[in-house]
Each structure stands twice: as structure tokens, then as C-alpha cells.
Image (cartoon, rainbow, N blue to C red):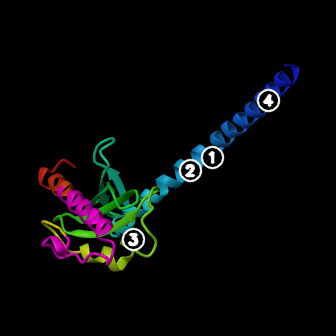
Amino acid sequence: MRDILKLGLKLLVIAAVAGLALGGVYAVTKEPIAEQERLAQVRSRQAVLPEAQDFVETEEGSGIYVGLSAEGETVGFCTSVITSGYANEIEVTVGVDTEGVITGVSVGGTNFQETAGLGARTKEEAFTDQYRGLTGDIALSKDGGSIDAIASATTSSRAVTNAVDAAQKLLLEVIEGGAY
């Protein structure tokens, strides 16, 4: 009985030390991780709206950003949409000019886990450049649109394409509503 109590006490001490260590690591890394995620989002916005020098959120928490030139003029808008891909979530950032024409698409996100060599190719410029210059309904060629899916990665290609279509329509509503 005494041995069981000693063993239990040792396990309790080990668990407490491990818990404190994990808590300390979390406290130390929480802010740097959040800052890296923020910088990744800024880089995505810059990639899809390269003419913009600064980005201002249209209203707190909306996730829709106005891209401003160095002179402070509106050059476009961008937003991110999270969609379900083949393996996990895919974050798709879309930029449009002031007429609603797509200026760029960035694919990725912190949870991006599409299959290497297949769905992961949705991040490549060869795929994302297909959206540049488009407006209106956007769909895969298999679905009556103009976007060529990545071979053997239709689920990922369709997820990205549907997200681009949804984001562009949302940004068009912002442009037409003049709520910026």
C-alpha cells in the first residue's frame, strides 16, 4: 500500500512539473505565433493585391480589406475564405480591383494539408494565375467554367474555385454597396 502511495506521489509531481513546463512554453510562444499568423495574412493580402501599399479593414472584424495606394487612393479589395479541401481546411485569399476583376489568389493557411504533389499544387501560380482577370461566375471547366482542375485533385481544385467565386461575389457586393 505504501509503495502505491509513493508511486502515485511521484506521478503527481511529474505531471505537475510537465504541466507547468507546458504552460510556460505556451505563455512564451503565444504572442510570437500570433504575430507570425498576422504577418502571413498581410503577405497574402499583398500577394493578391500587389498595387496596394496599405490595407484597412472595412469594419472591425469583417475580414474585408480596402487596399490603398501610397497616396491613399483605393486600388482594390481583398478577403479570405476558409473552405474544406480534400484533407483539411484551405484558406483562400482573393483580391479584386475597384471594378471587381480578380487581381490575384493566394492559397494556403495554417491548416493547409492537401496531398503533396496533388491537392497541394493548388498553391502553385500555374493554378492560381488562372483566376487573374476573371469576373462573374467562376467554376471549374468540368462544371461549365474556365478553370482547369489539377489532375487527380478535383476535390481540392473545386474547393479553391468555389472559395474564389464566393469571395469575389462578396467583394463585388462591397464595391456595389460603396460601404467602404
Find the distance from the CA under tag 1 to the CA under tag 3: 28 Å
Q: Of label 1 and label 3, which has the lower sequence position?
A: 1
Find the distance from the CA under tag 3 to the CA under tag 2: 22 Å
Instruction: Answer whether residue 95 is magenta in the image.
Output: no
Question: Residue 145 bears which disc, if any?
Answer: none
Mark 4, Cα crowd under 10 Å, few <14 / some 14-19 / many 20+, is few
Give the labeled residue for mark 3: 123
Q: Residue at x 76, y 28 (%)?
A: 12
Dividing the picture into quadrants, the one containing residue 147 is bottom left
The reply to whether dot 1 and dot 2 touch (C-beta < 8 Å) is yes
Q: Residue at x 28, y 47 (%)?
A: 58
Q: Of label 3 and label 2, which has the lower sequence position?
A: 2
Q: Which residues are magenta?
A: 140-169
Find the distance from the CA under tag 4 to the CA under tag 1: 24 Å
Give the labeled residue for mark 1: 29
Give the labeled residue for mark 2: 33
Mark in front: 4 vs 2 = 4
Counting from the top left corner in percent of width and height, residue 157 is at 29, 69
* Amino acid type of the residue tagged 1 in the rendering: Thr
* Amino acid type of the residue tagged 4 in the rendering: Val
Give the labeled residue for mark 4: 13
Q: Secondary structure at mark 2?
A: helix
Tell me, yes or no, if residue 144 can be seen here.
yes
The reply to whether dot 3 and dot 4 touch (C-beta < 8 Å) is no
Question: Is 174 above or below relative to 104?
Answer: above
Q: Of label 4 and label 1, which has the lower sequence position?
A: 4
